Amino acid sequence: MSLHQAEVIHAYRHLYRHALRAVRFAVPARYIIRDRIRHHFRDGDLSQFDQGKIDRTIEFLQYASRERGLEHKILKNFMNVLWHRHRRRPSKPADLAEHQFKIDRTAYDHFDHTLRMLNESMGMCLY
């Protein structure tokens, strides 16, 4: 195992551990976190691995687990939106109107943009 692979595995474990502590092992959130982190580490591009972003994200998760402040509220709302998004996958049944399908498909665009901007401005990698 190369040094880079060991760093990636180490980062995965630390992110997962601190994220579980931040949501206090709550049942829907813990599975959402597990699936999101697995997806991004398995399917993500290793050339984009940035230890600084991982460290800042872990620090954010530590603050979220210590106090019920802004970080905790952000993470709680993030998990809530992801849970609702996962429950309601946009599919195209025959009886669904075209405009309703378009609404379902684009309902989370603003949320995704806000999350991207939060990650970019704080140098984190909340997925």
Image (spheres, grey):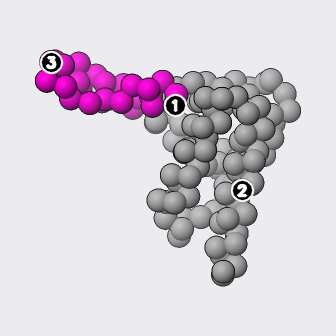
Q: Is residue 42 left or right of residue 76?
A: left
102 vs 6, nearest the viewer: 6
Identify the residue shown where x is 19% and y is 25%: 93
| Residue annotated with mark 1 | 82
Q: Which residues are magenta?
A: 83-109
Q: Quadrant of residue 33?
A: top right
Determine whether the residue tagged by mark 3 lies in a helix, strand or loop. loop
Label located before the other in sequence (1 or 3): 1
Label located before the other in sequence (3 or 2): 2
Q: Is residue 48 left or right of residue 98?
A: right
Residue type highlighted by circle 3:
Asp
Identify the residue shown where x is 70% and y is 79%: 3
Which numbered tag is attached to residue 59? Answer: none
Residue 108, horizontal then vertical, whole percent: 41, 29
Q: Is residue 32 magenta?
A: no
Q: Is residue 101 visible?
A: yes
Decide: is 41 above or below 127: below
| Residue annotated with mark 2 | 13
Q: CA distance from mark 2 to mark 1?
A: 21 Å
Decide: is 69 above or below 8: above
Identify the residue shown where x is 63% and y is 31%: 29
| Residue annotated with mark 3 | 95
